[in-house]
Image (cartoon, rainbow, N blue to C red):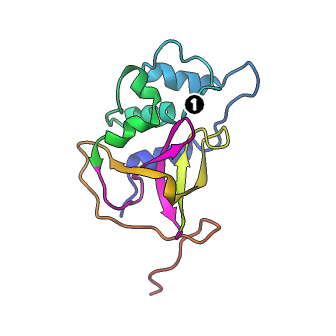
Amino acid sequence: MKEPIWLSVARLLVGIREIPGPASNPVILQWARYIEAPAWYHDDDQAWCTVAMNALLKGCQRPMAGTGYALLRAKTFESYGQQLLEPCLGAILVFARDLGGHVGLYLGETATHFFVWGANQGNAVSVAWIAKDRLTAIRWPPGVTLPHPLRVMLRADGSPISTHEA
C-alpha cells in the first residue's frame, strides 16, 4: 500500500516540541491559528495533539474534525470520516486517556501495542508505543477511498517483521 500523503507530511514534523515554561513554540500556536481554534487557545502547555492533527489534515487538503472547541478534542475524531474495522498505514487512531483522549496515525503494531505518530507525545511530535486496550476508534478521512486493511506487524524496536523474502 502506498503511504497516504498526510502520513508522508506527518513524518516531516517529527521533532517539533513544546517550549518549557511560560514561552510557547510559535509553530504550535501557528497551527492553532491555521485551524481557527478558539482564541483562548494560546499556550503549548494546553493539549495539542488534535491541533496538530487538524492542521496536518487541513494542510493536506482533507477535512478537519469539528469546529470551534471540537477542533481541540481528540474524541471528536471518534466520529470523523469513515470507520475502519482494522488499521492500515496512516489510519487515524483515537485513544482514551485520563481526562480526555489522544489522536495519532497508525504506523504498525505488536500483539499488545500500536506504533503511533502523534503530537504532544512526550511534549513533542514523535512516534510512540500506545497500548491497544486504550483504542476507541479507527478512522479514515472522508472522501478518501477506503484502503484495504493491512496490518503492519513490527518488532519491539519499531522495525517491520519480514513477510516476503523473495
Q: In which quadrant of the rendered image does the C terminus lie?
A: bottom left
Look at the image and tell me whether residue 82 can be seen. yes
Taking the spot 75% from the left edge, 28% from the top edge, the residue there is: 20
Q: In the displayed image of the protein, which residue is found farthest to the right?
A: 21
Would you say residue 32 sits in the magenta stretch?
no
Question: Label 1 crowding class (10 Å Cα cut-off): few <14, some 14-19, many 20+?
Answer: some
On the image, the x and y values in percent for residue 140 come to: 32, 48
On the image, the x and y values in percent for residue 109 come to: 51, 65
| Camera-nearest residue between 12 and 40 | 40
Q: In the displayed image of the protein, which residue is found farthest to the top?
A: 39
Q: Quadrant of residue 156?
A: bottom right
Taking the spot 36% from the left edge, 64% from the top edge, the residue there is: 1
Magenta range: 83-111
Look at the image and tell me whether residue 56 can be seen. no
- Mark 1: amino acid: Ala
On the image, the x and y values in percent for residue 15 come to: 65, 42
Q: Quadrant of residue 159?
A: bottom right
Could you tell whether 61 is left or right of 117 in the image?
A: left
Judging by the rendered image, the residue that carries numbered circle 1 is 47
Taking the spot 51% from the left edge, 79% from the top edge, the residue there is: 162
Taking the spot 42% from the left edge, 37% from the top edge, the residue there is: 75
Q: Note whether 55 is above or below 29 in the view shown.
A: below
Q: In the displayed image of the protein, which residue is found farthest to the front?
A: 98
Q: Note whether 163 is above or below 132 in the view shown.
A: below
